[in-house]
Amino acid sequence: MTPDYVAVQAEWSIDHALRHIRKKGKDSETINVIYVVDPSWKLIDALELRRFILAPMEQTVEQIMDHNFICIKALEDREEAVRMIQHYDLVALPVVDSEGVLLGTVTVDDVLDVAEEEATEDFHRVAAVAPLKMSYRESGFWSLYRKRIGWLAALIVVNMASGHVIARHEELLISSIALSFFIPLLIATGGNAGAQSATLMVRAIATGDLRADQWLWAVGKELLVGLGLGVTLGLATWFLGFYRGGFDMAVIIFLTMTAIVLVSNLIGVGLPFLLNRLNMDPAVASSPLITTVVDFVGLTIYFSIAVRIL
């Protein structure tokens, strides 16, 4: 936010206001938007400069006001300023305190820098990397190590759970070795499906396209999408299962692929909303986290279906 802006009062004439704009505009960040304040400096309007230029000199500022303006509270997150400027196509956004007193303004060139920083942080989180405080080129070995080791170590725990699922079904794998052929295919597809839906949700939440209270609608929508994707991929892999292990194996692969893609899709859409509800950045629902969770869930589904059929 910058405190360098031009403000006028409603009772001033247009002539008086223009003389004031010429005097104060030299030190202002921008004069594209002129703010109207009352004697206690509360913001009551934000007008384009062209309105003053085109208005008759004898009119007052109040006569050209429309009382239609957008502002942001000083304690709002800076991402909200980016969203508002993008949504309302503003060149400047006034900043007020809790009483509505004008404190400063945020210009579009300021939020471009903020948007770039926030996008970079989200990219880092999507890869399960704690956001870097400086550029990659300036970051040293120890900084890069610390930013990455935490998530990698945490994800090992979930990967160990996946290994435990396989170990519990060792006898089943020995009796039907063909089951092992499909493990990489199934869990990789589930991870990809979950990462897709999570990426869509994270971006939709970040841009304001989806609100936190719309999670149920999003889950219902992705339920149908996940079912469609699962059945399609299940049918595509049915032939591979039949070729590798016969009819029973084909049924197992079809049911497992359908279930894994459906469940992975729901995990991908639900986790960002859950993190957002916990006041955490939804970008933490990163591809590594989603794929690791889906590995465990997918293996559990796979062996549960295989046990019942075989």
Image (cartoon, rainbow, N blue to C red):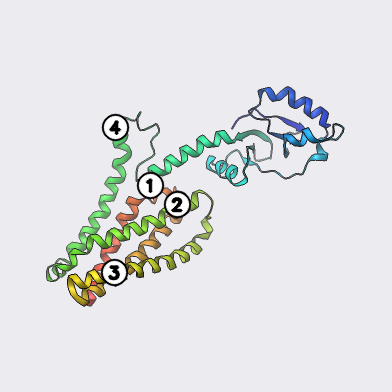
> In the rendered view of the protein, which quadrant contains the C terminus?
bottom left
Residue 142, which numbered label? 4
Residue to which mark 3 is pinned: 256
Q: Nearer the viewer, mark 2 or mark 4?
A: 2
Looking at the rendered structure, the secondary structure element under dot 2 is helix
Where residue 247 appears, x then y in whole percent?
A: 21, 77
Q: Earlier in the sequence, mark 1 or mark 2?
A: 1
Q: Nearer the viewer, mark 4 or mark 1?
A: 1
Name which quarter of the figure residue 102 lies in: top right
User: In whole angstroms, how far apart are the C-alphas of marks 1 and 3?
Assistant: 27 Å
Looking at the rendered structure, the secondary structure element under dot 4 is helix
Where residue 132 appears, x then y in whole percent?
A: 38, 36
User: In whole angstroms, how far apart are the C-alphas of marks 3 and 2?
Assistant: 27 Å
Q: Earlier in the sequence, mark 4 or mark 1?
A: 1
Q: Which residue lies furthest to the left in this view?
A: 174
Kind of residue indicated by mark 3: Thr
Q: Earlier in the sequence, mark 3 or mark 2?
A: 2
Find out whether the residues at labels 1 and 2 contact each other: C-beta distance under 8 Å: yes
User: In whole angstroms, how far apart are the C-alphas of marks 2 and 4?
Assistant: 29 Å
User: In whole angstroms, how far apart are the C-alphas of marks 4 and 1?
Assistant: 21 Å
Q: Residue furthest right?
A: 58
At a point 19% along the width and 75% down the height, the residue shown is: 246
Q: Which of marks 1 and 3 is nearer the N terminus?
A: 1
